[in-house]
Image (cartoon, rainbow, N blue to C red):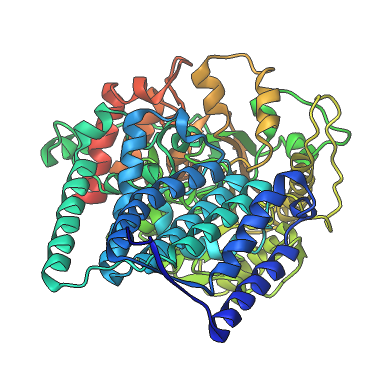
Amino acid sequence: MRSLISIIEFNRKRGCVSAASLFIFLFFWKLLPKFFSPLHSHVILPFSFVCVLCLLSGVKIRLSETVNKVLGILMLIGSPALCFVVVEFLGENLFFKLSPMVILFNYLIYGLIFLILFVITNRLWAGVSLGTVLCIFCGLANGFVREFRGYGIRSCDLFAAKTALNVAGNYVFSITVSRGYAILAALALILIAIHIDFRIKSLKPRLITAVSVLCCLVIFQGIIRNDDFMRGHNLRPFVWEISNSQLQHGVFLDFISGLPTLTVDAPEGYSVAKAKELINSSEPEEKVFGIESDFSGEKPDIIVIMNESFSDLSVNGDFSTDVPYLENWNSLSDNVVKGYTSVPVFGSFTANSEFEFLTGYSCSLLPGGMVAYSNYVRESTVNLSDVLKEQGYHSIFMHPFVESGWNRSNVYKYFEFDEIYYISDWINKEYIRNFISDSADYKEVIYRYEEAKRTNDSVFLFNVTMQNHGGYDNSEYETTVHITDLEGNYPLTEQYLSLIRESDAALMELLNYFDNSEDPVLILLYGDHQPGIEAEFFEEVNLRHRGTEAEISGSKYLTPFLLYSNRELSGSLDSPISASYLQALLMEAADLETTDYQDFLRNMYLEFPVVNIHGSLDCNGTWYTWEEAESLEAVRDYETVQYNLLFDK
């Protein structure tokens, strides 16, 4: 019987390859943390194994064609399975806890990736190597994203790549034990694959293989796009508990199955006539929000500040600190209206809170996990700037960061703001950590406002701050606020609260300036979302929060808002208000003419003060899960009107 190994070829050139492979491996090994020392019992076996594979990389093992074919097929079957297990391991998920259907679909995705790469390269070692690098890189990236925001990469993140690159420098990627083992497993798989010289030599079998893979791909994408099948088998990404979605579906399936949801279909029973009827029949009472203001017939200048990650964490449950972090905010009472707004996101996706305020559209009525600015905003998208410009306002947008984030460079051109400023235009560049401070930001707001007032009677300025952006583990920043009555240790939360204390001080600087302004001014400030801090903090304070499951879940999406004027202003809101209603509240408080759609929003507020997928609230104070709320007539009417204005114009 012919030996399986016909020839083992080794020469000086291949010896150099072996030595180089081993040197590179040992060099990078030295960069790993100390717990990867080969002297440790849990490391010595994989370390020795990869060293041997590096040495063997310079040895060419000539196998018979039959053996090559068998090993090649086994490698094409086994490599996707190994990568699937490793990627789930990196996502802190155990693959065997997934349902059989989920395991099958994930394996099919990995298998198609490897087959496509094999068909393209027609080299087993190349296809397996490229597939392994691609899968493990995605797994590492997903684990990194999950670490700092609480959930992994979702399909809509395709539209946020520039933003991710912009802020990535503020987070530290570290090699953990799981990441180290994942890299070792990937390297071992590649070093084994290079010895299998399997390829399809004839053109006809190559074409048959390519067509077969293409047919499998078409069939698979047809299944993925079949919403009834996917939802019936619980294979679509979650929109209620996003952080658990990957744990139930696996990393790749959760991502791939979310792609079809990025498109929006007309709601059931939709018609243009019905949408127009709903909009045109909106005739709310004069003061829906109960805010009284006196501008003596003048149009006030309007300044809106969406403050990055600004929130009062006590809304999730009571806790105490050694010094107050919102002392100035809590002391404000004259000509001020304060409350809570329900925002669509937590810890990230800032632009969705911008979108809700400026357009009045609710992200709860769009596919879960999307980025509205990247997916749905077009030149025809009506926004608050359009409405105010029709009433004589000069509009300004300001953001002390790069313009590529969240597609803002295009969005604010579509919104036709008269002036647009990013970090490159900033004059007052004072930093806290790596971001422009709120104090410096507000100085810039005052400067741009004063410049605009030289030539314009009425000014609308929309400012998105950056000071409190995520990454609350900066060792060079001094934490000044400490939690005193919780059992856990929460350094990220304490650094975050210290930043909020600085925002609180900066706010007083801004209000003190406008207290002395001769022109009437109306200022709205609200937070875009709560911060991505320790999950254990929320778990502990939630135990002190009495309420239903929907109410507790909804509280994680509440941020404070403040309405201030240097003229007479009074009123109060008894319940939270959706961010999508804030523009209607602002128009009413400014005594400006509202549009038919803003009147529709005012009517919606009377029935449902909060329409949010994370917890919706009716006028009687009852909280609903989204599964309960989306079947209510008022919410379905909102969806009909929104679809008409956003997609059917």
Taking depth in this image into account, of 349 and 559 the one nearest to the observer is: 349
Q: Residue furthest bottom?
A: 12
| Location of residue 560 by image quarter | top right
Q: Is residue 491 left or right of residue 261?
A: right
Rendered location of residue 590, percent (x, y): 50, 46
Rendered location of residue 415, percent (x, y): 38, 63
Residue 494 can be seen, yes or no: yes
Taking depth in this image into account, of 86 and 285 the one nearest to the observer is: 86
Rendered location of residue 70, percent (x, y): 30, 55
Vertical position of residue 206 compared to residue 391: above or below:
below
Vertical position of residue 459 compared to residue 596: above or below:
below
Q: Is residue 457 left or right of residue 211?
A: right
At 80% from the left edge and 25% from the top edge, which residue is drawn?
A: 486
Q: Is residue 460 left or right of residue 46?
A: left
At 20% from the left edge and 32% from the top edge, which residue is drawn?
A: 228
Q: Is residue 74 left or right of residue 242?
A: left
